[in-house]
């Protein structure tokens, strides 16, 4: 045995045993590691890391609704009525405090205040109340279920670093995504579908300026079987899922067994975990040939469910149809589901484009929460809504009472959660009158940092740590050794925000 082989085989350990438990009945995989397979059969999936979860979880699964582009917090949730009297006045220097600007507005001679033109209504669920814009009437109908965080912040100011940061814990590409970490740590609850599924929703306006890359739901340095599987919005949901013409299932099964035998020989010789991952992925693909068509067939859903999600839910690939699919995936034991909806980057013409985005998503977001609650699944399903950052109070481009644009703003933005062990019906955190800085209850500006947790301010590392906590995971213990150090989703940062927990 060579030195490389020794270290390769040693690295396999329990992780390979858990991986092999993916392989079941009828093929070569049926003979692998009976004890691990018994565990998989009992739990209808495959186990994660030993000792995971670290404690009793509140949530079994996550559905993340990602509004890519940066939704405008002050046009949707962060109501700032005092801005009306400051229309077209310059943003005060004592509010901006020299904070970083993007190159798109750093050359402006003025930073005129653009008040939101949309009406808000207050929902008195707590002392602060929850304000919701007229653009989100359906979301307002579930206000009593929402945990709205208005004091999110990030250091990233441009889209790709910001999305990469919130997805992987680093602004630089190459780290594992949130869903991959969850798959690696907690394992699967379903052996016929991937642990992590990604859906891309159509945008009715057709404006999707920001590109999305597969690395955003990738595994980085984790074993590749934990990557998100993207279901396509048109055509076959997964490419090459169907057998080639002239190939029957029996022959397909025999081919996979022969390939698995060859891969197993290589695995025994080299001990490379990626070979084991390849075996498991072939087996998963085989089982998905049956499970995915059944999943995508919505004919069995009653009319009242389609009515709940809205007319778009009957059209494949829409955000509404994706939300309905997310519920079906959750029912089938998929642990992490992410829906991407692009086009929230309104540098101009916001008062036309933002209503279009809200129309695409509002009813379906509310329907998903209501549907999960109706089915008794909301208590153990964490639903998360939001983007990578917020928008500025000052206008980018031409300003009028009826139309304006907003630049990127990482200093404060809004996300909401529902179900899965969070406090329902609350609004957490405060921002100043300009929705520019996070402030404490007295109105004093908070200057948070990644290294020191400041109550009232929620960094994206804190958000990710809190989400993992709801899944029963101590974020400091979900690690992977790579290039001589232990990596984790929250890097060396992150604090659980206990004020958000029920």
Image (cartoon, grey):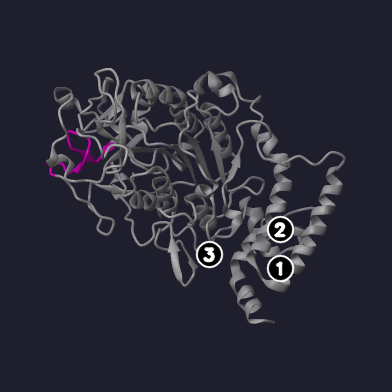
For the C terminus, the quadrant is: top left
Q: Is residue 500 above or below residue 19?
A: above
Question: Is the Cβ of the residue at disc 1 closer than 8 Å to that at disc 2?
Answer: yes
Q: Which residue is mark 2?
A: 279
Residue 223 location, quadrant: bottom right
Q: Is residue 317 above or below residue 444?
A: above
Name the chief secondary structure element in magenta.
loop
* Percent position of residue 124, x then y: 25, 27
* Percent position of residue 44, x then y: 63, 50
Whichever of labels 1 and 3 marks the residue nearer the N terminus, that label is 3
Which of label 2 and label 3 is nearer to you?
2
Range shown magenta: 427-444
* Percent position of residue 455, x then y: 22, 50
Badge 1 crowding class, 10 Å Cα cut-off, few under 14, some 14 to 19, many 20 or more, is: some
Q: Give the spatial CA distance, label 1 vs label 2.
A: 10 Å
Whichever of labels 1 and 2 marks the residue nearer the N terminus, that label is 1
Q: Secondary structure at mark 1?
A: helix
Please indicate, yes or no, whether residue 367 appears anywhere in the rendered image. Answer: yes
Q: Give the spatial CA distance, label 2 vs label 3.
A: 22 Å
Residue 109 location, quadrant: top left
Q: Which residue is mark 1?
A: 267
Please indicate, yes or no, whether residue 443 appears anywhere in the rendered image. Answer: no
Q: Which residue is mark 3?
A: 50
Left/right placement of residue 10 relative to residue 186 reads right
Q: Secondary structure at mark 3?
A: loop
* Percent position of residue 215, x then y: 52, 50
Q: Give the spatial CA distance, label 1 vs label 3.
A: 23 Å
Left/right placement of residue 306 relative to residue 81 reads right
Badge 3 crowding class, 10 Å Cα cut-off, few under 14, some 14 to 19, many 20 or more, is: few
The image's mark for residue 475 is none
């Amino acid at each position: 045995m060579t030195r490389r082989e020794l270290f390769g085989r040693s690295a396999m350990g329990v992780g390979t045993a858990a991986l092999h438990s993916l392989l079941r009945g009828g093929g070569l995989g049926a003979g692998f590691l009976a004890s691990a397979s018994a565990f998989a059969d009992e739990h209808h999936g495959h186990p994660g890391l030993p000792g995971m979860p670290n404690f009793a979880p509140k949530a079994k699964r996550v559905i993340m609704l990602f509004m890519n582009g940066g939704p405008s917090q002050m046009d949707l949730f962060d109501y700032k009525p005092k801005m009306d009297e400051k229309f077209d006045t310059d943003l005060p220097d004592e509010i901006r405090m020299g904070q970083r600007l993007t190159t798109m507005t750093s050359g402006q001679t003025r930073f005129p205040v653009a008040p939101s033109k949309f009406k808000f209504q207050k929902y008195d669920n707590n002392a602060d109340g929850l304000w919701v814009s007229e653009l989100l009437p359906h979301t307002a109908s579930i206000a009593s279920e929402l945990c709205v965080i208005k004091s999110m912040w990030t250091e990233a100011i441009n889209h790709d670093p910001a999305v990469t940061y919130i997805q992987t814990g680093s602004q630089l590409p190459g780290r594992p995504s949130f869903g991959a970490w969850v798959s690696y740590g907690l394992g699967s609850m379903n052996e016929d579908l991937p642990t992590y599924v990604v859906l891309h929703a159509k945008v009715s306006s057709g404006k999707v300026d920001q590109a999305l890359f597969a690395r955003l739901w990738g595994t980085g340095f984790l074993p590749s079987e934990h990557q998100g599987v993207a279901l396509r919005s048109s055509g076959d949901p997964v490419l090459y899922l169907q057998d080639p013409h002239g190939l029957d299932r029996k022959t397909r099964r025999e081919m996979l067994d022969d390939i698995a035998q060859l891969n197993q020989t290589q695995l025994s010789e080299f001990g490379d975990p990626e070979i084991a991952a390849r075996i498991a992925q072939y087996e998963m693909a085989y089982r998905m040939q049956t499970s995915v068509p059944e999943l995508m067939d919505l004919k069995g859903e009653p009319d009242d469910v389609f009515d709940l999600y809205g007319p778009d839910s009957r059209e494949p690939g829409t955000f509404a149809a994706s939300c309905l699919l997310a519920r079906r995936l959750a029912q089938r034991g998929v642990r992490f589901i992410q829906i991407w909806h692009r086009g929230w980057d309104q540098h101009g013409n916001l008062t036309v484009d933002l209503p279009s985005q809200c129309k695409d998503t509002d009813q379906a977001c509310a329907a998903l929460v209501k549907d999960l609650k109706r089915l008794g699944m909301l208590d153990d399903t964490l639903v998360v809504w939001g983007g990578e950052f917020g928008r500025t109070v000052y206008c980018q481009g031409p300003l009028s009472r009826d139309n304006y644009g907003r630049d990127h703003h990482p200093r404060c933005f809004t996300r909401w959660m529902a179900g899965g062990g969070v406090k329902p019906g609350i609004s957490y955190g405060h921002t100043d009158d300009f929705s520019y800085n996070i402030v404490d209850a007295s109105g004093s500006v908070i200057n948070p940092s990644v290294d020191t947790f400041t109550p009232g301010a929620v960094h994206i590392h804190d958000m990710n740590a809190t989400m993992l906590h709801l899944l029963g995971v101590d974020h400091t213990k979900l690690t992977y050794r790579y290039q001589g150090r232990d990596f984790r989703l929250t890097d060396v940062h992150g604090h659980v925000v206990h004020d958000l927990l029920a």
